Amino acid sequence: MAKISTRYICQACGYSSAKWMGRCPECSAFSTFSEEKVAAPTKKSSFETARGSSGSAAPQSLSSVEAQKTPRLSTGMSELDRVLGGGVVPGSLVLIGGDPGIGKSTLLIEASVRLAQMYGSGLYISGEESVSQVGLRASRLGLESDDLLLAAETDLINIENHIRELKPAMAVVDSIQTVQHPGLDSAPGTITQVREGATTLQRLAKELSVPIFLVGHVTKEGNLAGPRALEHIVDTVLQLEGETHTQFRILRALKNRFGSTNELGVFEMTEGGMESVENPSQLFLSQRQESAPGSAVAAVVEGARPLLVEVQALCAPSYFAAPRRVVTGADYNRVLVVLAVIEKRLGLRLGDMDVYINVAGGIKVGEPALDLAIALAVVSSVRDTPLPKTLCAFGEIGLAGEVRGVGHAERRASEAARLGFSHCCLPRAGVERLGHLEGETELRAVSSLRDAVETWLPDALRGRDAGAAAHRSSSQSGDKKSRFGPQNGSNGATPQNQSRFAEGRGEAVGSDSSEEFEPEM
């Protein structure tokens, strides 16, 4: 009989200890240890396992293995198929995560209904909702299908039996944190239960060639809850992102054994469910106000997909000792760098202004190619001068004010030309490879931020340069006077003093008078 022992396991990293600890020595997390009972394997069971493994298949050489192309199953949602690499691979285990209320269950139940209608069967297992609640959501989305079966189950053994009996074209388990193996004396959601559930479902998917989708919870930092072992077990990890108050959702592939992780899917949350957005660039720019100061269009690449987004900037006088910097949709630290470069290299004073930066549409962009569009939008807002409505810009800005090249320049420029942008401001590096686009759009290569501003906002720096020159001239004149004394024999008397002294003597002295006045003693 196996000996039962009590162990304390960290739910964040899986570290095991014989006693409870407030802080995990492996991942430094606080209050993450949970008590679990573990059965130690006996020598007999270990020997039987070793004997059973002796009958496994012999290793094969790489050249003798035939690559079999398994046909993929289409979900009927083009954006989901794009992120998965062309469709669902039979026998794959897919994990999808996201914030609460972002639309994970809505996306999967819609994909299950469409796939069941095309391939004849589907199974949706919910561990958090009852069957009636799932049916209520489906009716609200207008989804009806006799081929999709619903079950409210948390027992791992029963879930395995359902999948073996039905052998559906697609199975969904919502969520993996609610699944519990009855043979393990631990609470659902613990590392032991999650690992056992994922391993059992992975083995089942490979054995029956049934694709299984798992819904995973996320922590307050936005990461998938539980240890990273769950992400290593599954074949594909998808992340659904977006703001709950906006209608756009972004689906990214963080891991994909059957496709590229550079793909990106864009969905729009409507009353009828998650709808695929075929042309996200046009949708992001549909509400753009033309001829508005502080608005610029940037060409960014999310994964392998080029997108055109609107960057908005608003610079207003600040009434606080520390001006505000509010950034939405962009990297906060990069925006601060761009503002510092504008102040240092262009001479525009931003230290007494509140600066607000927003990427319209609720999308989050983290790549440095957004720098040039941010800088142009800020200068446009400061000078209250709109940029050309047919201008699209991209490029990284260095600390010296130079515009550096970015990857996928051809895709960005082609996307801008496809949407009707006749002017494109881009880095000078690599522009020679875009000669075939000259007929579609005018490519204006710049090497520095000053070149870009002088090209598209010619009057933005003229007043500043003239004022700076006058300031330098007056400063030099003041230094000269203070260093060598008053000029033109004025003996240090200002025009106001000269006028006052002249009134005392009944004389009028002009500002251009060269006579010296000596007061009577």
Image: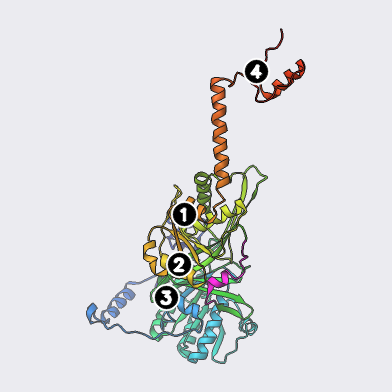
Give the structural element (helix, strand or loop) at label 2.
helix
Quarter of the picture holding the N terminus: bottom left
Q: Left or right? Give the position of 143 relative to 192.
A: right
**Few, some or many residues within 10 Å of mark 2 (<14, 14–19, 20+):** many
Tell me if 12 is positioned left or right of 385 in this view. left
Q: Is residue 285 magenta?
A: yes
Front label number (1 vs 4): 4
**Pointer 1 residue:** 28
Q: Mark 3 points at which residue?
A: 199
Q: Judge by depth and name the residue closer to the eye, 434 or 496.
A: 496
Q: Earlier in the sequence, mark 3 or mark 1?
A: 1
Secondary structure at badge 1 equals loop
On the image, which quarter does residue 142 sit in? bottom right
Q: Distance between the residues labelled 1 and 4?
A: 84 Å
Q: Which of 9 and 111 is in front in this view?
A: 111
Crowdedness near tag 3: few (<14), some (14–19) or many (≥20) residues, C-alpha within 10 Å: some
- Give how far across and how far down residue 104 sits, in percent: 55, 74
Mark 4 / mark 2, whichever is N-terminal: 2
Q: Which residue in the protein does label 4 denote?
A: 515
Upstream in sequence: badge 3 or badge 2: 3
Q: Give the range drawn in magenta.
A: 277-291
Of labels 2 and 1, earlier in sequence is 1
